[in-house]
Image: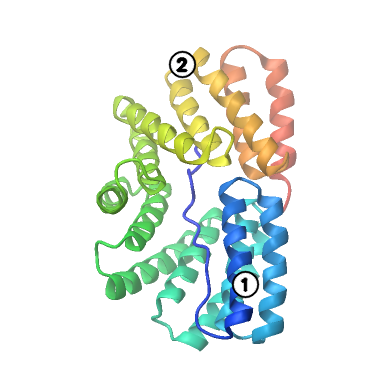
Amino acid sequence: MKTPILPIIVFYLLGSGFVCAETELNDLNEKVETLYFQGNYVGAIRVAKMALKIAERDFGQDHFNVAASLNNLAELYRAQGQYTMAKPLLRRALLINENALGPDHIDVAMNLNNLALLLHAQKQYTEAGSLHKRALEIKEKILGSDHSDVAISLNNLAALYSTEKGYKEAEKLYKRAMLINEKVYGLDHLSVATSLNGLAVLYEEQGKYEKAEPLYRRALRIVEKELGPEHPTVAASLNNLASLYSIQMLYSQARPLLKRALKIWVKTLGPEHPDVATGLENLAQLQRKTHQDEEAVLTEKNAAKIRAVIR
């Protein structure tokens, strides 16, 4: 099973309002973003909760600055697989911004993007696709067709199409997003890695292994360089490359990558995160293929315990 590398999370800074209050909030939100990219999700959630309380105190329940703080906290919950915690926050943020800013505002597009990602994770594909398309339409209208924020929506919509086996359309969107990001950021940006990973998954699922491997490797080099060797996104990239090796029966190459990915995920996300379950499931499959049946049974049981948690 594959995991997306660097799901495109959009953190908000703030709009116009009371300068002192917003300075404090912006400082907190910048800290949230820093902690997230360091892989410190627990610390980021603590700061995000503080920011939300301050926003509600200083601006009231229905202000767009409150929506920004709701979004940030929800995205951190989503990154940890706590979907039931994230969803009401994202829906509330979307409603606030639609009422405060209008249905076609760029901030509404960001809300739509993040809610769609959560719905995708919960396998609610129809609603997720509708929200992604609406976000893309808003962004193209306001920002133009070659903006980096447009590439975010292209990547996310492509991932949804790929999940539903719409490979032809997904490939087209991934390639368009990658061209935009390479032009805007250069060849080694994290957004480029997202498209590379998506394309590699797409090729792998079609049996085009020789096309998938160099893309996985390039994506891994980018995320290790940009995020460091122990970030959960690096683990996702390791897991995906390991899965490619495993399907080709290159088990000696797959095993160390899977074990390294699991170690990173447990350390950064905690032992009950869905990505840990994915890693355990992949390791169990490898153990089965290499006749380590007793170890595989234990690994499968540990993964099943994680999957049994309602999210």
Q: Which residue is mark 1?
A: 25
Callout 1 secondary element: helix
Tell me the amino acid under the disc marked 2.
Answer: Met
Callout 2 secondary element: loop
- Circle number at residue 249: 2
- Quadrant where the C terminus sits is bottom right
Q: Is residue 207 visible?
A: no
User: Which of the marked residues, 1 or 2, is nearer the chain's N terminus?
Assistant: 1
Is 257 situated above or below 158? above
Residue 266 occupies quadrant: top right
Q: Percent position (x, y) of residue 72?
A: 59, 65
In this rendering, which labeled residue sits more in front, label 1 or label 2?
1
Marks 1/2: CA–CA distance: 51 Å
Q: Percent position (x, y) of residue 123?
A: 53, 55
Q: List the single residue furthest toward the front.
A: 20
268 lies left or right of 190? right
